Amino acid sequence: MKVLLINGSCNTSGCTFTALSEAAKSLDENGIETEIIQIGNKPFRDCIGCGGCRKNNDGKCVFSDDIVNEIIEKAKFADGFIFGSPVYYAHPSGRLLSVMDRLFYAGGAAFAYKPAAAIVSARRAGTTASLEAITKHFTINNMPVVSSNYWNMVHGNTPEQVLQDKEGLQIMRILGNNMAWLLKCIETGKEAGITPRKEDKIMTNFIR
């Protein structure tokens, strides 16, 4: 089993990476393979709703000049996900949100029915609003949301300060353990022939 951890910060070894690494340690200790993907510091196109990915029916975004389609391909073979972001003006990284919008619009099938979690890093506030924005991608896509013993956040303005947030680090460790536990429960369920009951999507767009 494998979990992809997506670092939505432009800092490769900053506060968000420190938090993701702590969760990854717990997953590794539980025998779950992990990979931290750094989306980088260049601008990302946002989803323009062109529908090209659906017309082509290939599960890929038509904008192929960045990491989005690479992540979609990796997601097909992953079993769980943790998306991490710094908090900017009480919201997640715009870079991460642009990536997630395109990931889930073009490649939602690669993520559906797989557990996911959001983690955020902040100097002080704006964390719960940021968690909500990220988590909504999961809850529109049939993904079990993994929790910890508190909201999934760490505090600090530098990685060194994050390492002093003992409660935050514990939250990350418990999150990793809970993710591993749920993955193993799902695997056991599959072996017993238990799979999600699916329905075709109903859309009542006329209701406002």
Image: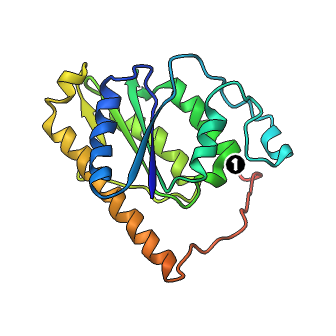
Give the amino acid type for the residue marked by disc 1 in the picture: Arg
Foreground residue among 14 and 100:
14
Name the residue at 63% across, 34% down. 68
| Whole-percent x, y for residue 62 in the image | 77, 33
Name the residue at 52% across, 53% down. 78
Q: Is residue 177 above or below residue 13?
A: below
Q: How is the image coloured?
A: rainbow
Side of 39 relative to 15 (left or right): right
| Whole-percent x, y for residue 8 in the image | 46, 29
Residue reaching furthest to the right: 55
- Assign a secondary structure to mark 1: loop
Disc 1 marks which residue? Answer: 208
Foreground residue among 72 and 101:
72
Name the residue at 80% across, 34% down. 50
Within 10 Å of disc 1 (Cα), the crowding (few <14, some 14-19, many 20+) is few
Q: Is residue 49 above or below residue 114?
A: above
Q: Please indicate, yes or no, whether residue 154 appears anywhere in the rendered image.
A: yes
Side of 45 relative to 29 (left or right): right
| Whole-percent x, y for residue 167 in the image | 16, 41
Foreground residue among 24 and 45:
24
Residue 89 quadrant: top left
Side of 155 relative to 206 (left or right): left
Name the residue at 62% across, 52% down. 110
